[in-house]
Image (spheres, helix red, strand yellow):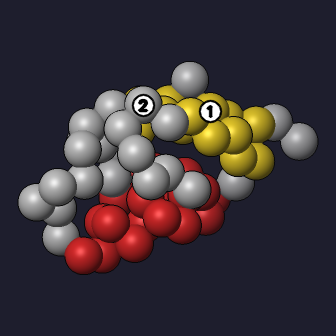
Amino acid sequence: MATIKVKQVISRIGCPKDQRRTLDALGLKKTGRVVEHNDNPAVRGMIEKVKHLVSVE
């Protein structure tokens, strides 16, 4: 299965609570962190919700 790397590029300070929880679910706690996930619709949906805070490699 294909994997994607997600990197948090902008701080979570000032973001709504649901976006902070989405970042937690992705495993992103600090700016600059990179995590690897399987490429599936659930993960893609979470990335879409916080697309202004992360970059996808």
Q: Residue at x 25, y 53 (%)?
A: 12
Q: Is residue 22 above or below residue 27?
A: below
Q: Is residue 15 above or below residue 54?
A: below
Quarter occupied by residue 16: bottom left
Residue 21 coordinates in the image, percent (x, y):
40, 72
Return the disc, 1 or 2, that comes first in the chain's sequence: 1
The residue under the point 89% across, 42% down is: 1
Seen from the viewer's position, the closer of residues 23 and 56 is 23
Asked which secondary structure carries label 1, the reply is strand
At label 1, which amino acid type do we have? Answer: Lys
Q: Is residue 40 left or right of residue 1?
A: left
Q: Separation of disc 1 and disc 2 at Cα?
A: 12 Å
Looking at the picture, which amino acid does disc 2 mark?
Answer: Gly
- Residue at which label 1 appears: 5
- On screen, residue 36 versus residue 55, left or right, reads right
Label 2 CA crowd tier, 10 Å (few <14, some 14–19, many 20+): few
Mark 2 residue element: loop
Position in image of residue 45 (x %, y %)? 49, 59
Q: Decide which of 31, 51 is in the foreground and name it.
A: 31
Residue 4 visible in the shown view: yes
- The residue that label 2 is drawn on is 32
Residue 49 in which image quadrant: bottom left
Outermost residue on the right side: it is 1
Residue extending farthest to the top is: 57
Residue 45: assigned label? none
Q: Quadrant of residue 41?
A: bottom right
Residue name at image x 44 percent, y 53 percent: 29
Q: Residue at x 69, y 40 (%)?
A: 36
State left or right for residue 32 relative to residue 51.
right
- Crowding around mark 1 (Cα neighbors within 10 Å: few <14, some 14 to 19, many 20+) is few
Give the quadrant of the C terminus: top right
Q: Residue furthest left?
A: 14
